[in-house]
Image: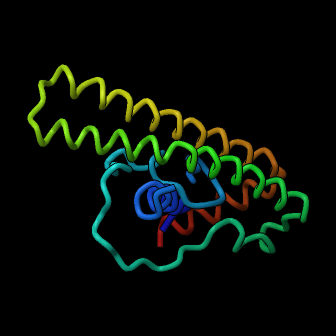
Amino acid sequence: MNMRSLVTAGLAFLLVAAPTASFAETTAQPAVIAQNPNIDPTVSAAPQQTQKAKTIWDYSKELNLTDKQTTDMKAAFADLQTSVKSKAPQLQTLAKQLNDLLKSEAPLEQIKPKLAEIYAIRLDLHMADIATARKINAIMTKDQLAKWREIQQKNRKG
């Protein structure tokens, strides 16, 4: 499983299963919305058994991350998690409202703005995810980043 999938899965869990973070590109921790446009964070999926996937923290020795780099990366991720958690209740409320509109077969003119609200939040989360990924990448040295991308590529293949 690649790191993008891990990032995507983690955020989906936070938004759906544990009603309360997402790196796109080449990031450190799980997050979902930004990576998989087919996953709707307002709909919970059937329970699945998953294998614990490795994150950047599992490769800290291999990447020779310093304590400061690890601390800075964790701070960037914590900021993202805070943003995700702050938007989760709003997403859940909007999802319920959308569901109610759909159940009542409300006019499309009422459904479209509700969808626009939901996807505006998802866009914000996606952008925050990408920004966090870039912060994480900027924390690493050129050699560390190259090694990290190599690890990710290897994990994607098998």
| Image point (70%, 47%), residue name | 79
46 or 94: which is nearer to us? Answer: 94
Q: Residue at x 41, y 57 (%)?
A: 16
Most extreme residue toward the left is: 105
How many numbered discs, if any?
Answer: 0
Nearest the viewer among 30 and 64 is 30
Residue 29 relative to residue 96: left or right: right
| x and y, in percent, of residue 43 in the image | 30, 53
The residue at the point 56 percent across, 50 percent down is 85
User: Is 143 situated above or below 131?
Assistant: below
Looking at the picture, how far across and down is residue 35, in whole percent? 46, 49
Image colouring: rainbow
Q: Picture quarter containing residue 70? A: bottom right
Q: In the depicted view, which residue is nearer to us: 79 or 73? A: 79
Lateral position of residue 75 relative to residue 133, left or right: right
Q: Quadrant of residue 132?
A: top right
